[in-house]
Amino acid sequence: MQKELLKITESFPFSRIAVVGDCMLDRYIKGKVRRISPEAPVPVIEVNEEKSVPGGAANVASNIKALKANCILISLTGEDKRGQELISILEKKGIDTGGILIKKNFRTIEKIRIVAEHQQVARVDREEKFQADRSLLKELLKKIEKAAQDGAEAVIFSDYGKGIFNSLTIKEMMSFCGKIKLPVFVDPKVEHFKLYKNAACITPNTSEAFGGMRETVKYDQFSAQKLGEKIVKELSLSSLIITQSENGMTLFDNFSKKMKISHLPAKAREVFDVTGAGDTVISALAVAFSRSKDMLKSAMIANHAAAVAVSKLGTAEVSLDELKEDIKLWEKP
């Protein structure tokens, strides 16, 4: 299997994926705890590093590019310094930002994480509530159509619940992608879960899967399997992956209309941070499937990518070389 998976990864540079979703700027302030503040019972952090990285849908795009695949990001930023900084970072990575809509009345989302001794101490969010309307939907559909015309083989909907996705936009975008035969991969929010009918694949974690289907059954492997079968049937999905943290992931492959269920155990290693791991999974999955059209092998590759991602601190990118090394380490020749 090692040889087959590596062969798929060799073709990643020929892949082109569109990403639609809520993008944001993730800022990290890192330092050491020197003492407790006399003003309040909180640590005083001596800052020694600050960095900004793409977050949300922009992190998905970054993960795709790190795998040496091609990517166009379709999203929204404000006409502000944070938006300019985010676009600049993406362009330096070689990501196509032609799909980003820049709006005067929108404030670019920023999440600031304060980290000390490899532990997140606090997070500060800068964002304003908004909901995409029909006017914005038309612009997004035009960008999706252009991406498909330019060779996109699949599209990822990166739903962070920040306004781009709602009942109106999801229904119209899913319908449009179906008409132009563009496979849709979705990382769903619980409140939108049942709207992603006919997707090529959705990748919820256990909590999102149970919450999205309004299930209250206590989690175990058996109930998760039954739930997965129910989700695929009710949402008419071609496939479903339920990620289960240290328990790995379960694939429900329905492309042949004959359900095949495969559990992929997690690759054992020390877990530092799960931030952005879901982005890594869906990025590797979509790229691998666009080249192989084999969901099981694509899921195996995504499982390796996830293992590398959680071993890193912060919003993670997994390089193609790191992915290949992990496959060589764990898969039999």
Image: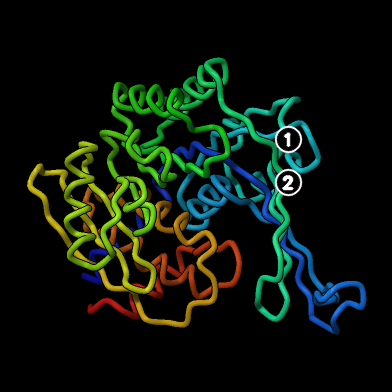
Quadrant the N terminus occupies: bottom left
Q: SS of the residue at dot 1?
A: loop
116 horizontally vs 232: left or right: right
Question: Disc 1, disc 2: CB below 8 Å?
Answer: yes
Query: Counting other residues with Cα less than 10 Å from the Cα at mark 1, is it few (<14), some (14-19), or many (20 or more)?
Result: many
Q: Residue reaching furthest left?
A: 258
Residue appearing at x 29%, y 37% in the figure: 199
Q: Residue at x 22, y 67 (%)?
A: 221
- Tell me where residue 200 sits by quadrant: top left
Image point (57%, 20%), residue name: 136
Q: Which residue is mark 2?
A: 126
Q: Residues within 10 Å of mark 2 (few under 14, many from 20)?
A: few
Looking at the picture, how far across and down is residue 328, in whole percent?
33, 77
Q: Position of residue 160 (x, y in %)?
A: 52, 44
Q: Secondary structure at mark 2?
A: strand
Quarter containing the C terminus: bottom left
Task: Tell which residue pokes out farthest to the right in this image.
Answer: 38
The mark that comes first in sequence, 1 or 2, is 1
Question: Residue tagged by mark 1?
Answer: 107
Q: Splitting the image into 4 quarters, where does residue 46 fall?
A: bottom right
The answer to whether 21 is drawn above or below residue 304 in the figure is above
* Whether residue 183 is situated above or below residue 259 in the rendered picture: above
- The type of residue carrying mark 2 is Arg
Q: Give the image location of residue 216, x and y in percent.
A: 30, 55
Measure how far apart labels 1 and 2 are at the Cα level: 8 Å
Instruction: Report whether 299 appears left or right of 307.
Output: left
x, y percent for residue 255 = 16, 44
Structure colour scheme: rainbow
Q: Amino acid at mark 1?
A: Arg
